[in-house]
Image (spheres, helix red, strand yellow):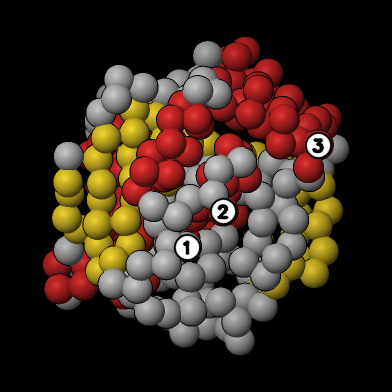
Amino acid sequence: MKKTPQTLTIAGSDSGGGAGIQADLKTFQELDVYGTSVITAVTAQNTTGVSAIYPMSPQAVQMQLGAVGSDFELAALKTGMLFNSEIIKEAVAAIRKFGWKNIVVDPVMMAKGGADLLQQEAVDALKTQLLPLALLVTPNIPEAEALTGITITSAASRRYAAEQILGLGAKAVVIKGGHAVNTEYAEDYFLQTNGESVLYRSIRIVTDQTHGTGCTFAAAVTAELAKGQQLKDAIFTAKQFIQAALSEPLNIGKGHGPTNHAAYKAGMLGKKEVNKIEVFQ
C-alpha cells in the first residue's frame, strides 16, 4: 500500500493564518504531502504585526514531539519559530531520538513588524545544537547577517556568509534575496559543503502581500524533500511556489497581507512571465 509522504513543522501559531504553523500546513497540503505539527508558541498577530507571544512549556513541546514521533513516519521536517533555547533543546533531542532526516531549518528571528521571535540567548543554541543537524538552512539576508556577523552587500559577502553558516555544521544553505537592494530581481543563493552553488533568479514582484513568505518557502522545500526530490530541485520548486503565491495576491488585511498558497496548484505558475525562474550554476 502506497503511503502519502509525511512531514512535520515545528513552529509557532499565527492567529492571522499567514505564517507559522498555518502557512506550513497550507503549503504541505498544496504540495500533496501530509503535515503534522508541533506548536512552540501561540502568537496574537495579524497582518499589521505581533501583539503578544505565549511560548509553550518545554514539556508541552516534548509531549507533542513524542506523540508525532511515535506514530508517524516522517520523510522530512522543518523548524520555524523556536523562540527560546529550551524549545530548541527539545527539538534537537527529538530529532536525535527518532532519527529524523531531511531537516530544514528556517532560522526565524524577527517578524516583519519588528517583533523578536527568537530570544537572544537562543541564538547560540540554534547555532551550536540545531544547525549541525540541518540538511538545509534558509535564512533571509538579515538572518544570515545575524548568524554570521557579516554585512551582506555584494555577491562576495553573500558567499562568505553562506560559507560561515556551513561552517556551523549545516550541509547546505540558501540565502534568500527578498531583502536585497536589487529592485529588478530576487536572487536566492544556494551553497553546499562540496562547494557547489546555484543562483535562483526571478523577477522581483513589488507587493506588500508578503506575510509568511519565509515559512512558505521552507515548507515547500520540506514537502518536495519528503517526496524524494533532490535538494537543488526542491529549492527550485519552492522558488516557483512562492513566486506564484506572490504574483496572485489575496489582498487581505490592513498590513503585510498573506501570500496565496493556492496559486501554484491552481496553475498560475506558467501564466505570467513574472513567474519564470532562471538558474545559474
Is residue 173 or residue 156 the one in the foreground?
A: 156
Ranked by sequence position, the earlier of labels 1 and 2 is 2
Amino acid at dot 2: Pro
Q: Secondary structure at mark 2?
A: helix
Q: Secondary structure at mark 3?
A: helix
Tag 3 residue: 121
Q: Can you give x and y, in whole percent of width and height, for residue 263 in the image? A: 31, 69
Q: CA distance from mark 1 to mark 3?
A: 25 Å
- Identify the residue shown where x is 28% and y is 72%: 184
- Identify the residue shown where x is 33% and y is 62%: 186
- Mark 2 or 3: in front is 2
Amino acid at dot 1: His
Let me know if residue 85 appears in the view.
Answer: yes
The quadrant of the image that shows the N terminus is top left
- Which label was assigned to residue 142? 2
Ranked by sequence position, the earlier of labels 2 and 3 is 3
In which quadrant of the rendered view does residue 20 lie? Answer: bottom right
Tag 1 residue: 179
Q: Can you give x and y, in whole percent of width and height, for residue 200 in the image? A: 25, 51
In which quadrant of the rendered view does residue 269 lie? Answer: bottom left
